[in-house]
């Protein structure tokens, strides 16, 4: 039961703000779905479908939980934090993202995570490996300061060895200077 | 052995002086006691050398192709040093039907006329897979034979026989065994992941050394050439593996955090490495078995990439303690630290010359991200740029005799390995392999082991 309450909290904390950001995209989806709903209303075999619908709703509440879990999990995994060149300090945006990560980790008290520190390709491998270490450690320190148990968080630096983007542009380099979060 | 004292920052006058000395030395009857090549300034004037095509040693028939192959390999290997100006065989004034190979038969005027100061003659006999080889090195002015060697072995030993003769030649001319007995370890992505490979000093015979199917980087040779330490993600995080080059010995340094940039102490089974076990990258001294002997750096900043002075009393390393990565030197006994790079805001990858008080490193320009190789003398701390206008140049390392520098460059697109002299001259590609190559580590002279 605790878990369920936490999920509602999580959904509010994580999913709702996330939806706010995606509103403009969703509007378009709604519009395309509208004409599809009309022929369904004219269907004669309504009784059989109702019975099925009952079952579906009870599944649906579970599925909604599941979906919320998946959404929160995906957000945790896919929302990276970013750094300036040769820097490992956390800017305001990175701190906001980390606060959401802390909420997730508080709600999911039994998961362990690894923070991966990454760099762009500029500079040399050795120094970037050290820099990635510091980027991962600064995110870990922040989460620990937010009350997350240190033993649940491992760090690993990949330096410039695992870029997400391989073009030689500032836009691409910016994407590579990141911490990525993995659930163990 | 006479060694001309290196007169720094006065290259031109020193060169003129050196030429005069060289001429006097070449003319003197005791020439063999002196060095022909000043190893402190060997590339200012390349010595004109003629290598006569190898002749059959006896009446047994031998295919022309074997003779040419031997002559060419000998020429290529000696050329690799950058010491010599190889004279065109077309210009030789010799009777192709009666080429002379011994001092008594050679008309040295034929060689001095075309400008040759050194001459190598060779002979070869082949019987089945067995070969006999004879090589002689002459001083064409004095007419003296400086080196004469006879070898026999299998045809498959040809390269190693020629390598041994080249070692004799360079030992005679410089007082140093040169590069021929060394290998280069490097990283290649040819198999789809970063693995370590080994090749001969000249890029020949590349072979895969690791099969971790992970990221394996930063190879470092022990000073006896028997062990390779490197960083690998074989266990999903950066650890240092130490492996016997020819054997099954294996040590793992897998402290919490990032274990990286191992560097072996000269003459000892000990290494310095950067570990983040204390929370940030610090340099430690460890035994070859991976036990921490002591912590060398103590600083809030990242300290990494240690490299040893040849006497083993100091290390140079990279630290971000000034806010940007710069190179520092620390005396191990006193703990005294001195910053040595001040130009540019990103100086990394230092490697201390195995024979002198100089450090080669990579300087990166912030805005472009482009890197070049620099050389800095510990006496004056004036950096000299050795590469330029040719892509990214990184990861320099010294040949064991301190005469050449191997490095990686993107000048032809993908990252590949190149070699140059310590003056930045004679830049050429080391080898052609699929994928990209980086992080070269040049071994000590392995020929005695």
Image: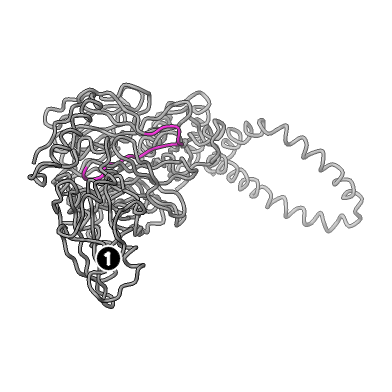
**Scheme by which the image is coloured:** one colour
Q: Is residue B279 visible?
A: no
A166 with respect to B282 (left or right):
right
Residue B396 seen from this side: yes
Viewer-side residue, A11 vs B125? B125
- On screen, residue B374 versus residue B136, left or right, reads right
Q: Quadrant of the C terminus of chain B?
A: bottom left
> How far from the left and from the top, in percent, is residue B433?
43, 54
Q: Nearer the viewer, residue B229 or B148?
A: B148
Could you tell me which chain the residue with mark 1 belongs to? B
Q: Residue at x 89, y 57 (%)?
A: A45
Residue B197 or residue B386, whichever sits in front = B386
Vertical comparison of B155 with B188: above or below: below
Q: Is residue A117 left or right of residue B84?
A: right
Classified by dominant secondary structure, the portion drawn in magenta counts as loop
Q: Quadrant of residue B51?
A: bottom left
**Element on which disc 1 rests:** strand
Please say if B432 is above or below A25: below
In the picture, the quarter occupied by the N terminus of chain B is top left
Classify 10 Å Cα crowding around label 1: few (below 14), some (14-19), many (20 and above): many
Q: Position of residue B246 (x, y in %)?
A: 23, 61
User: Residue B267 location in percent, x, y?
Assistant: 13, 46
In the displayed structure, B207 sits above or below B87; it is: below
**Is residue A175 magenta-colored?**
no
Left or right of B253 in this view: A103: right
Q: Quadrant of residue B160?
A: bottom left
Task: Pick whichever, A66 or B213, lies toward us.
Answer: B213
- The residue that label 1 is drawn on is B55
Counting from the top left corner in percent of width and height, residue B310 is at 16, 38
Which residue appears at 24% of the width and 65% of the height?
A: B123
Q: Tag count in the figure?
A: 1
Magenta residues, as a range?
A: B387-401
């Amino acid at each position: 039961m605790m878990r369920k309450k936490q999920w509602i909290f999580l959904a509010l904390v994580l999913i709702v703000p996330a939806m706010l950001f995606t509103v403009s995209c969703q509007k378009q989806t709604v519009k395309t779905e509208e004409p599809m709903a009309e022929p369904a209303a004219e269907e004669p075999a309504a009784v059989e479908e109702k019975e099925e619908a009952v079952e579906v709703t009870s599944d649906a509440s579970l599925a909604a939980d599941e979906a919320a879990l998946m959404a929160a999990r995906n957000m945790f995994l896919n929302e990276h934090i970013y750094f300036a060149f040769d820097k490992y300090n956390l800017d305001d945006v990175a701190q906001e993202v980390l606060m959401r990560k802390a909420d997730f980790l508080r709600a999911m008290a039994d998961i362990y995570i690894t923070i991966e520190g990454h760099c762009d390709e500029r500079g040399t491998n050795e120094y970037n490996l050290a820099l990635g270490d510091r980027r991962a450690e600064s995110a870990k320190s922040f989460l620990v300061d937010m009350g997350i148990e240190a033993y649940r968080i491992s760090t690993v630096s990949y330096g410039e060895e695992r870029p997400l983007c391989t073009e030689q542009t500032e836009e691409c380099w910016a994407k590579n200077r990141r911490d990525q979060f993995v659930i163990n | 052995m006479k060694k001309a004292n290196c007169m720094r920052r006065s290259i031109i006058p020193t060169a003129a002086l050196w030429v005069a000395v060289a001429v006097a030395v070449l003319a003197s009857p005791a020439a063999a006691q002196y060095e022909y090549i000043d190893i402190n300034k060997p590339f200012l004037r390349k010595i004109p050398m003629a290598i006569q095509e190898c002749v059959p040693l006896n009446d047994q028939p031998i295919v022309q192709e074997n003779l040419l192959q031997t002559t060419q390999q000998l020429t290529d290997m000696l050329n690799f040093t950058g010491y010599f100006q190889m004279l065109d065989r077309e210009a030789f004034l010799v009777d192709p039907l009666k080429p002379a190979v011994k001092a008594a038969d050679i008309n040295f005027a034929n060689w001095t006329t075309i400008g040759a100061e050194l001459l190598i003659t060779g002979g070869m006999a082949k019987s089945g897979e067995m070969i006999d080889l004879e090589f002689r090195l002459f001083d064409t002015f004095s007419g003296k034979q400086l080196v004469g060697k006879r070898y026999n072995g299998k045809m498959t030993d040809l390269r190693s026989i020629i390598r041994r003769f080249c070692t004799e030649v360079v030992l005679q001319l410089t007082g140093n065994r040169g590069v021929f007995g060394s290998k280069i370890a490097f990283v290649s992505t040819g198999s789809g992941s970063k693995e370590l490979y080994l090749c001969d000093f000249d890029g020949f015979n590349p072979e895969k050394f690791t099969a971790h199917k992970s990221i394996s980087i930063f190879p470092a040779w022990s000073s006896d050439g028997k062990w390779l330490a490197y960083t690998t993600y074989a266990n999903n995080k950066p650890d240092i593996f130490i492996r016997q080059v020819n054997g099954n010995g294996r040590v793992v340094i897998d402290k919490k955090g990032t274990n990286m940039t191992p560097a072996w102490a000269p003459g000892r089974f000990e290494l310095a490495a950067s570990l983040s076990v204390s929370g940030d990258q610090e340099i430690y001294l460890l035994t070859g078995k991976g036990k921490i002997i002591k912590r060398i750096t103590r600083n809030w900043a990242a300290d990494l990439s240690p490299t040893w002075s040849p006497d083993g009393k100091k290390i140079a390393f990279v630290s971000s303690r000034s806010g940007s990565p710069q190179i520092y030197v620390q005396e191990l006994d006193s703990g005294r630290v001195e910053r040595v790079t001040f130009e540019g805001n990103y100086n990394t990858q230092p490697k201390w010359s195995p024979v002198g008080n100089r450090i080669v490193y990579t300087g990166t320009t912030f805005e472009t991200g482009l890197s070049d190789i620099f050389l800095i003398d510990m006496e004056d701390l004036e950096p000299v740029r050795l590469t330029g206008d040719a892509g990214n140049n990184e990861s320099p390392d010294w040949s064991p005799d301190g005469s050449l520098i191997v490095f990686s460059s993107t000048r032809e697109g993908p990252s590949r390995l190149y070699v140059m002299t310590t003056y930045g001259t004679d830049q050429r590609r080391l080898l052609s392999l699929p994928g990209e190559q980086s992080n070269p580590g040049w071994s000590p002279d392995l020929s005695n082991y």
